Amino acid sequence: MARESRRRSWAEPFKIKVVEPVRMTTREDRRRALDEAGWNTFLLRSREVYIDLLTDSGTSAMSDRQWAGMMIGDEAYAGSENFYHLEQTIQEVYGYPLVVPTHQGRGAEHIISKVLIQPGDVVPGNMYFTTTRLHQELAGGTFADVIIDEAHDPSSEHPFKGDVDLNKVEQLIAKHGADRIPYLSLGVTVNMAGGQPVSLANIKELHGLCSEHGIPIYLDKTRVAENAYFIRDREEGYADKSIADIVHEICSYTEGAWMSGKKDALVNIGGYLALRDQKVFEEASNMVVVYEGLHTYGGLAGRDMEAMAIGIRESVEYDHISARVRQVIYLGEKIASEGVPIVKPVGGHAVFLDARAFLPHVDQDDYPAQRLAAEIYLESGVRTMERGNVSSGRNPQTGENFRPKLELVRITIPRRVYTQSHMDVVAETIWETWDRRSEIKGLDMVFEPTYLRFFQARFRPQE
Ligand code: PM9
């Protein structure tokens, strides 16, 4: 009789060579730390945190190959070898011929917004991202959300909640005219929607529509490899394609891209613009010398560029990206198994708790997601981030909070840093917080900075 095969358990596709101890704290320590940090998890000191799931930005573990690359950093002021390696890698992996390095993603956003946007322009995008929208506004533009409606519904199981609604784009063109739309800002995966992917079918259709009207698409490709994983997994016709091929195809429909290398590209610092248009490139590489550094280093050390070049290649390896995304899905499914409301389907870089459903008794202007992130930290030292009313900011015309439909807490997983056992502890922490949800109240904001308030705002708990 044939024996049934035993399926092996899943395991991380790496061995651990260097370890960094983490520090456990008491509930009293954490209460004191929260009071000092104004109940904002961004203002905690890292030494006060046990498992740090604030962000996947710049927090990934580099590989031994990347660390080896750091040793061949060419720290020449001009013409560093590592820049040319980075440029060649971007040309080969993503297909863009022209590269302008920047210190991180928002350096690239600043420059591309200044080059492309004129005051009074409208910039459509598939949901706002905090730093992206701010740079578009500072350049004189107005952001217009053109993501499909399902993206604003945490319970919708749409497999590509990052897709663009083409009708919304057409309506914008009819209202403002194509000449007032300098580009369409396309995010993959869509961070604020819950790390949700965009389908290639949608990108192709969008490309057709935008081409008809002479509107270029610029890509925020910060998490493009994660998006490619979902396309391979969910979209018909891509199951046999490599992640590298899918990434290349996504980029082929776009005129240029900005990138925070601190996510997909597995580095602690770095970013760039990748372009096709020679004129845009010339303006951007002139502007980079004003704000970032010479056009062959853009605020980075040679060793940073080398590590990013190597990280880009690792980011499109199937074993890496599937383990990365599946770890996030593992955590999401475990948290949800006890009835905790999360954004569905689970996204590529984070599990997002639906704070409206978690704390229905807290009004949105009492910042339920901000309070929930603080309570999760209080529970066991796990640090997460608010992605709701605080992150969204105020309407500049009315001064009112935007009160976005999504009021979320983001539990973000750094790449190659934590194991499944850490994920189990995190899930148990969320369950414990869920069990005492009826006792949790809101927050009063007592300090509000002008820009990107979520980073530095301070709060007082309503007792
Ligand atoms: N994202 C994140 O934690 C770090 C800053 S906001 C808390 O998710 C996208 C989609 C991002 C992003 C940063 C940037 C900016 C652009 N686009 O942080 O400047 O998620 O490298 O990139 C963060 P930099």
Image (cartoon, helix red, strand yellow):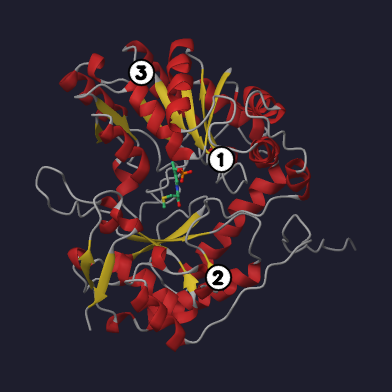
| Label 2 secondary element | strand
Q: Mark number for residue 296? A: none
* Above/below status of 198 relative to 100: below
Q: Is residue 183 visible?
A: no
Residue type at numbered disc 1: Gly
In terms of depth relative to the viewer, which is nearer, 391 or 72?
72
Q: Is mark 1 within 8 Å of ligand 1?
A: no
Q: The C terminus appears in which quarter of the rendering?
A: bottom left
Question: Residue 66 location in percent, x, y?
Answer: 73, 44
Residue type at numbered disc 3: Cys
Which residue is at 55% across, 70% downward? 51
Tell me the mark number nearer the camera, choosing from 3 and 1.
1
- Residue 222 vs residue 91: left or right? left
Which residue is at 57% across, 45% downward? 269
Query: In the rendered image, which residue does mark 2 sit on?
Result: 51
Q: CA distance from mark 2 to mark 3?
A: 43 Å
Query: In the rendered image, which residue does mark 1 sit on?
Result: 270
Question: Residue 248 location in percent, x, y?
Answer: 60, 26
Tell me the mark number nearer the camera, choosing from 2 and 3.
2
Q: Is there CB contact under 8 Å for labels 2 and 1?
A: no
Residue 68, picture quadrant: top right
Query: In the rendered image, which residue does mark 3 sit on?
Result: 210
| Label 1 secondary element | loop
Which is more N-terminal, label 1 or label 2? 2
In terms of depth relative to the viewer, which is nearer, 163 or 261?
261
